[in-house]
Image (cartoon, rainbow, N blue to C red):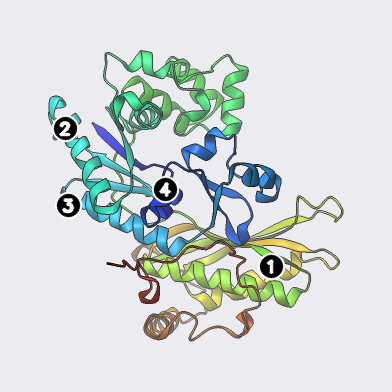
Amino acid sequence: MYAIIDCNNFYASCERVFNPKLNDKPVIVLSNNDGCVIARSNESKRLGIKMGVPAFKIKHIINKHNINVFSTNFSLYGDMSKRVINTISTFDIKMEIYSIDEVFLDISEFKYHEINDFLNEIKNKILKWTGIPVSIGAARTKTLAKAANYISKRSKKHKGVFIINDFNRTQVLKLIPSIDVWGIGRKLNFFLISNGINTAFDISNIDLNWIKNKTNITTQKTVKELMGESCISINNNFNKKSICTSRTFGNMVESLSDLESSITMYATRCAEKLRRQNSCATIAIVYVKTNIFRNDLPYYFNSKIINFSVPTSDTGEIISCILKELRKIYKVGFKYKKAGVILSGIVPNNCVQQDLFDTINRNKKNKIMISIDKINNKMGRDTIRYASQNFAKKYILKQQRLSKSYTTRWGQLLEIKVS
């Protein structure tokens, strides 16, 4: 048996923890530079606000319904996520941190009649200790647990905890659209619908050989999981399989030097995350794009893939390779709105395949990175930085509706006045 704990409207809930006046009122959280909607409270969902919609397109709805709008506060959200995970850890149970607001649990050691009480205990403790409401779904497989969570989030009848068993599985799967099944993306869902497969129940009845031949073994596993056959176990490796740092610029960028400065910073952040999880990357991707919403300006998007001969986490090596490719895709005359760096093909440090013809002294480079990380951790981020990153912070994020970092900055701790 598996369970998944999913924080309800997580970013919006984090804002409500420290501002109870927001309870039962519509709340949305915007992406970097206050661009698009990335989180909505239930009240905002009922007003028809969609995920990913640009804020300027719903300005009339925001004003009409007095919606509370917040800029992203990732330091606050990250800390609240750790608090939720630490609370779950007090139950001493095998778990997998799936995302910032989702955790899988292995509850196979519990007897069936004990599961509901146990999951309710977790739910209530998380709410009491952190203030974050959660919904929990449980079932024989992880995919079915996600389906159970779909019900627990939408049905008040079950009070945040729902379990799929052999008796209700068919009935429940008929209620879930195929697009909402874990592992079914938009492209695959279009294929399924074109073949008359519209619900999770339909997927669970697909012929296994047919789906394997038409798609891949991963989709076949999804079908098996919906049938009740466990194919995906708890993953104790919390390391990320890919790392991305990207930003939407507050003001559009035209010059190559300004793009290089931003890309250097993004590559630096990605490399820092790599080293924190003791990993190296074999692939890097750099991309740039103009504003898709500006019909008065020409649109341009391009990217380049870099394959490292030896997996690396060396900031200098990553920056050097990425900037070389950036210069190939940069075009004069365009106003760039977004750029980013993605590292993938991530492997543990102790599994790096060396190259006989490698000319880099990697032991020396590793010592340099360790020293830089120690200094920056002690003295502050970017105390030591690469020259191409520049020293002037030209591109400070546009965060006009940023809440306080109540739990991560001494100067912004919550104040309580006692009369």
In the drawing, what numbered circle is on residue 325?
1
Closer to the camera, 62 or 3? 62
Q: Residues within 10 Å of mark 4 (few under 14, many from 20)?
A: many
Disc 3 marks a residue whose amino acid type is Thr
- Judged from the image, the secondary structure of the residue bearing numbered disc 1 is helix
Vertical arrangement, residue 78 with respect to residue 356, above or below: above
Residue 285 in view (yes/no): no
Q: Residue at x 62, y 46 (%)?
A: 62
Q: Nearer the viewer, residue 248 or 62?
A: 62
Give the mark nearer the N terminus: 3 vs 4.
4
Nearest-to-viewer mark from 1 and 2: 2
**How many residues crowd mark 3 within 10 Å: few (<14), some (14–19), many (20+)?**
few
Indicate the quadrant where residue 176 lies: top left
Q: Position of residue 366 (x, y in %)?
A: 41, 79
Q: Give the amino acid type for the residue marked by disc 1 in the picture.
A: Glu
Q: Element under label 4?
A: helix
**Quadrant for the N terminus in the image:** top left
Q: Which mark is residue 90?
A: 3
Q: Which residue is mark 2?
A: 117
